[in-house]
Amino acid sequence: MQFTPTALPEVILIEPRVFGDDRGFFMETYSRRVFAENGIDLEFVQYNHSHSSRDTLRGLHYQVEHPQAKLVRAVLGTVYDVVVDIRHGSPTFGRWIGVELSATNRRMLFVPVGFAHGFCVISATADVIYACSDYYHPAGERGLIWNDPDLNISWPTPAPLLSPKDQRNLQLKDLPADFTFHPRPGRSAQQGK
């Protein structure tokens, strides 16, 4: 596997080795040992699978109680995956990155604690699987609004399909300081609080 830091250095793009022939392919998507050797030393305790139609935008989500790091990949179709640094005091606070994840490119994205995450479907449909480092906790669920003018995210559609909950998410300037940046020597990739 190849682990590549993005413009948000704690957010890691992961490209698995794919072994294919005329029968199909095989790839390893997670090895705790290999991930730990590359600075992502945590246990995933919950796996989620979403199926969405074109122009569906899910996000930008995070949890303040039982915060979750996530490992995200598309297993059907293509999504534009976005991550925003919401750690107050971070040198990259309020910055975002967007990457295309697809069943074809087989890339994965590691999203640490302290970052809001969302995606928009750019194929007819898409199935996304994401592993989480903690359990879903409804009382701690929060969201950052998809079209915040201070972020100016380049989403692939101007009129996405949103849940009622995601239509009410907050702007970055209104987010409480739930996550703060604390630089430390030897800081591992998943630490965000």
Image (cartoon, rainbow, N blue to C red):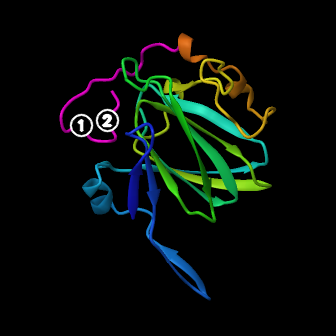
The residue under the point 43% across, 42% down is 11
Position of residue 159 measured from the top left corner of the image (x, y, whole percent): 81, 32
Residue 127 within the magenta-colored segment of the rendering: no
- 166 vs 12, left or right, is right
Observer-side mark, 2 or 1, equals: 1
- 94 vs 53, left or right, is left
**Local secondary structure at mark 2:** loop
Residue sticking out furthest to the left: 185
Q: How many labels does the image show?
A: 2
The residue under the point 43% across, 69% down is 28
Density class for disc 1 (Cα within 10 Å; few <14, some 14-19, many ≥20) is few
Q: Which amino acid does label 2 sit on?
A: Gln
Q: Quarter-wise, where is residue 161 in the image?
A: top right
Asked whether the beta carbons under mark 2 and mark 1 sit within 8 Å of each other, the answer is yes
> Residue 162 versus residue 186: which sits nearer the camera?
186
> Residue 169 versus residue 16: which sits nearer the camera?
16
Residue under label 1, please give it. Answer: 187
- 115 vs 120, left or right, is left
Calculate the distance from the C-alpha at mark 2 to the C-alpha at mark 1: 7 Å
Position of residue 121 measured from the top left corner of the image (x, y, whole percent): 72, 47
Predominant SS along the magenta part: loop
Residue under label 2, please give it. Answer: 191
Q: What residue type is labelled 1?
A: Arg
> Residue 9 versus residue 122: which sits nearer the camera?
9
Q: Quadrant of the C terminus?
A: top left
Vertical comparison of 95 with 70: above or below: above
Which segment is the magenta one?
Answer: 175-193
Position of residue 104 measured from the top left corner of the image (x, y, whole percent): 63, 65
Vertical comparison of 152 with 17: above or below: above
**Local secondary structure at mark 1:** loop
